[in-house]
Image (spheres, rainbow, N blue to C red):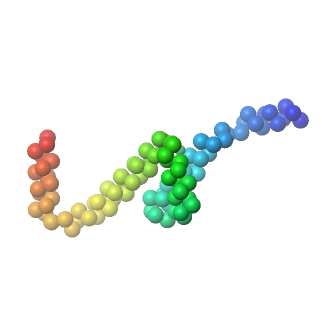
Amino acid sequence: MESKITEVYQNAPVEGKETECEKVSKLLDLVIDGEATSEDQHYFNHHIEDCVTCFESHQKQKLLKGLVSGHLKRVIVPESLALSIKAKIQKTL
Ligand SMILES: [Zn+2]
């Protein structure tokens, strides 16, 4: 009996970080879309304070979503503004 308990213990996933990351990665979409509950949001925020991996994937997701909505906005940006931004970018090159 004792040996079996040891075996189960050794095969168990590392309690804490790994499983937390799995939970957080599932929450990520909800958080990005603003559909997470305040409890989930709190859990998520608390986790990414300590976990660089999840923090980075959150940043990437945010950026990606920003690019998508940025693309939609660009349609209504006046052409003159787009040109002046282009000119600024070219100056820095
Ligand atoms: Zn994590």
Q: Residue furthest bottom?
A: 76
Where in the figure is residue 33, as x and y percent of width and height?
45, 62
Q: Residue at x 44, y 50 (%)?
A: 58
In what quadrant of the picture does the N terminus appear? top right
Q: Nearer the viewer, residue 14 or 44?
A: 44
Where in the figure is residue 9, as x and y percent of width and height?
76, 36
Q: Residue at x 63, y 43 (%)?
A: 16
Q: Residue at x 72, y 36 (%)?
A: 11
| Left/right of residue 72 with respect to residue 10 in the rendered view | left
Q: Is residue 53 above or below residue 30?
A: above
| Left/right of residue 13 with respect to residue 53 in the rendered view | right
Q: Nearer the viewer, residue 47 or 3?
A: 47
Where in the figure is residue 18, as x and y percent of width and height?
60, 42
| Residue 75: quadrant of the picture | bottom left
Q: Residue furthest top?
A: 3
- The reply to whether residue 26 is in sight is no
Q: Residue at x 44, y 58 (%)?
A: 32
| Left/right of residue 24 with respect to residue 88 in the rendered view | right
In what quadrant of the picture does the C terminus appear? top left
- The reply to whether residue 16 is in sight is yes
Q: Residue furthest right?
A: 1
| Residue 3: quadrant of the picture | top right
Numbered marks: total: 0
Q: Is residue 13 above or below residue 79?
A: above
| Left/right of residue 83 with respect to residue 68 in the rendered view | left
Q: Nearer the viewer, residue 19 or 68?
A: 19
